[in-house]
Image: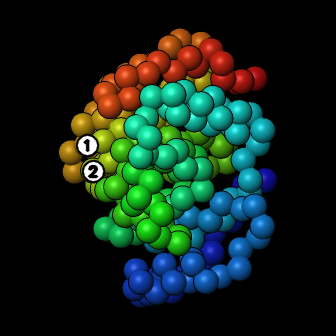
Amino acid sequence: MSALTVSQDPDQSWDDLVRFWEEMEWPEGSKVEIIEGIITVSPSPASRHNVIAERVQRRLYSVIPVDWGVFQTLAVAVPSRLGMFVPDLLVAPVEDCAATDTHIPAALAELVVEVTSKSNARHDRVSKPAAYATAGIPLYLLIDRWAPGGPTTTLYGEPRGDVYRVLSAVKFGDPLKLPAPFDVTIDTGEFPFD
């Protein structure tokens, strides 16, 4: 099943768009995001997708400070890019995240992790990294099961404007090291990819 877009009034303000996103009753278990000003409703991720996120989450919890958390369903707002994104994993200070009901400013995130789905991989490869870089999120980890050359994991950092620099890229099966403040190696060989 692929993502569904919800038609919106193009003249609607950011605040009105967010209010609609917050107040609408969306299908149970779906992932609802605002991507480039368009509300996108995606089905729950497949099991392999969730296993990959779980493997990364387990590694992150072993190294993050006690006052940080790893969140799976917390949205990050990037109003300048008309984006409200729900990354597969988000690392941010718990205190900042506890102060909101629906979302946090993306600039509060230390790391976002996206695992591509076949139907909407373009968003994870193009729209989201541009928005995350614009917000100044220090690290973006893209786990791309559907990359054209085969499954890859790419770590982006050093955001400037709406562009990240590639810090490291590996094929599934190779290790990938996250820099400080994480200083942890992700074993991509643990990821299911068939």
Task: Look at the numbered disc 2 and give the secondary structure of its residue.
Answer: loop
Q: Position of residue 22 (x, y in %)?
A: 57, 78
Residue 43 falls in which quadrant of the image? bottom right
Q: Are marks 2 and 1 in contact (CB under 8 Å)?
A: yes
Q: Where is residue 59 in the image (x, y as percent from the top left)?
A: 54, 27
From the viewer's perspective, is residue 179 above or below residue 120?
A: above
Q: Name the residue under label 1.
A: 159
Amino acid bearing label 1: Pro
Category of crowding for the residue at label 1, using alpha-carbon neighbours closer than 10 angstroms: few (below 14), some (14–19), many (at least 20): many
- Residue lying furthest front in this view? 66
From the viewer's perspective, is residue 16 above or below residue 101?
A: below
Seen at 59% across and 39% down, the residue is 115
Seen at 70% across and 39% down, the residue is 50
Residue 144 visible within the image = no
Residue 156 falls in which quadrant of the image? top left
Amino acid bearing label 2: Gly
Q: Could you say which is closer to the camera, residue 82 or residue 58?
A: 58
- Indicate which disc, 2 or 1, sits on the residue closer to the N terminus: 2
Q: Position of residue 148 (x, y in %)?
A: 57, 28
Q: Could you say which is closer to the camera, residue 12 or residue 159?
A: 159
Task: Look at the numbered disc 1 and give the secondary structure of its residue.
Answer: strand
Q: For residue 136, which numbered disc appears in the image?
A: 2
From the viewer's perspective, is residue 185 above or below residue 163?
A: above
Seen at 78% across and 53% down, the residue is 1
Q: Distance between the residues labelled 2 and 1?
A: 6 Å
Q: Could you say which is closer to the camera, residue 39 or residue 138?
A: 138
Q: For residue 131, which numbered disc appears in the image?
A: none
Seen at 59% across and 50% down, the residue is 72
